[in-house]
Amino acid sequence: MWCQDSAQTREWGHGRQEVRRCFCVHVTSADWPQAVQHWADLQCVVLVERERTVQVPEGLPPGATLLPEVTQHFYLSSLPPDAPRLLHAIRSHWGIENSLHWVLDVAFDEDDCRVRRDHAAHNLATLRKIALNLLRSDQKLKVGIKARRKVAGWNEDYLLRLLAAP
């Protein structure tokens, strides 16, 4: 088996350099009979390798270097083996995922919730996401999600307007 397509991106930000490499292998029923049988519409297997190097912090001796951290992530895809497209899709997905969790933690203190019994944690997570969508739907109040949540707790008219929104 060999790599049919590959791509690479390089980014600097937040005191680190990150290089992402994507390798794709086309999946055929001849080469991967069990995989094709178990995964509907399977087109390719994707390897994304992330190499992250953190900027040398102050206080280390001159010339000191930090070793890069390399991680590998494997994906199954129903898309054809187009490495640049898949690399962009995977990166975009994690950006969305990270921003959602960040908002839920900042506006709803989700990480501090210690509810663990039965289905309560899942039910509360669902309610938080419904509340987040309702708060985001309001375009009249020009403040952040956390502030909108507080206003909804203080002002019944605003709360009813959120709940009645189409």
Image (tube, grey):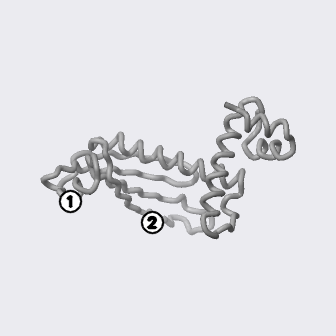
Residue 79, by quadrant, is top left
Q: State the separation of the CA atoms marked 1 and 2.
A: 39 Å
At 67% from the left and 51% from the top, the residue drawn is 128
For residue 98, side relative to residue 49 (left or right): right
Q: Residues within 10 Å of mark 2 (few under 14, many from 20)?
A: few
Check disc 1 and report its element: helix, strand or loop: helix
Q: Residue at x 40, y 51 (%)?
A: 20
The vertical placement of 59 against 150, above or below, is below
Coordinates of residue 38 in the picture (x, y in percent): 26, 57
| Nearest the eye: 5 or 42 | 42
Residue that badge 2 annotates: 67
Disc 1: which residue: 34
Amino acid type for the residue under numbered disc 1:
Gln
N-terminal-most mark, 1 or 2: 1
At a point 67% along the width and 35% down the height, the residue shown is 137
Q: Where residue 73 sits: x, y (%)?
A: 38, 58
Task: Out of 139 and 128, give the one closest to the viewer.
Answer: 128
Mark 1 Cα shell of 10 Å, populated few (<14), some (14-19), many (≥20): few
